[in-house]
Image: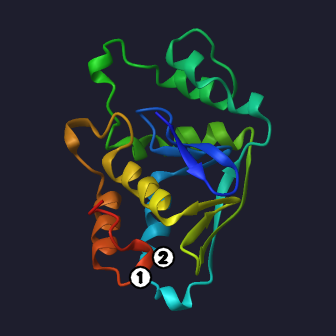
Amino acid sequence: MPLSFRSESHGNIAFGFFNIESDMLLLENYFFFADRFCEWMVESAGRADSGLSGLHCHAYHIADPNDIGDLMGAIHGIRYTGFIGKIYELFPFPEDPKDFKQNPKGNQTQGIVTSEIEAIAGEKEFTIEFFEKDQVQLGPYVFDMSVFHELIRYVWQGGYPRYKEEIKPSYVLKMEKHILESHNRFFKGVFSS
């Protein structure tokens, strides 16, 4: 489930997994798969922080909130609207709340989820920028370094409610390894806080 994170540029914004059978993340009205996010972090962690310019990426963008849908309505099975509603029609919330765990094999649904989001959204440039004053910009949103670390840890642990049986996908383990080996100050302490 997405959580609220404090941005420096737009106040509190939503970030996170929105369906346990998909590894797609939302960042307010931008959508991208977790393996892509992890690759962005691997590439950024491998750069020297003195030479960080921008990492030019792409993410799906849904401008109209009505096209995004009603997450809580979809979770409760009472209102399937927009993109999120369509995903919950395909992958409903589990009947037993104890089964509410992020599927570490959620990337296996990427083809289905991609076809659904491409019906309503196109990809848009999504730049990741690192600033000397210990701020990181993801798309249009600027975060201080501690919140940037929280975003990384959220993906690493499988968000809320965490990965099923604490099994992390291989791309998350790769991200963890590269961050732990990084000499880039923007990644220092990600897993020690």
- Determine whether 100 is above or below 112 in the image: above
Residue density around tag 2, few if under 14, some if 14–19, many if 20 or more, within 10 Å: many
Q: Position of residue 68 (x, y in %)?
A: 69, 33
Q: Report whether 144 appears left or right of 179.
A: right
Label 1 sits on a secondary structure element that is loop
Q: Position of residue 186 (x, y in %)?
A: 45, 75
Q: Distance between the residues labelled 2 and 1?
A: 8 Å
Q: Mark 1 points at which residue?
A: 184
Amino acid type, residue under disc 1 in the picture: Asn
Label 2 sits on a secondary structure element that is helix
In depth, the one of 67 and 127 nearer the eye is 127
Q: Name the residue under label 2.
A: 44
User: Residue at the spot x=28%, y=79% of the render?
Assistant: 181
Determine the image quadrant of residue 8: bottom right
User: Residue at the spot x=32%, y=69% of the render?
Assistant: 189
- Marks 2 and 1, the one that precedes in the sequence: 2
Q: Report whether 181 appears left or right of 6.
A: left
Determine the image quadrant of residue 179: bottom left
Marks 2,1: beta carbons within 8 A = yes
- Determine whether 43 is above or below 64 in the image: below
User: Residue at the spot x=42%, y=60% of the render?
Assistant: 149
Q: Where is residue 133 in the image (x, y as percent from the top left)?
A: 58, 76
- Determine whether 99 is above or below 37 in the image: above
Viewport quadrant of the C terminus:
bottom left
- Determine whether 94 is above or below 15 in the image: above
Residue density around tag 1, few if under 14, some if 14–19, many if 20 or more, within 10 Å: some
Total numbered circles: 2
Amino acid type, residue under disc 2 in the picture: Ser
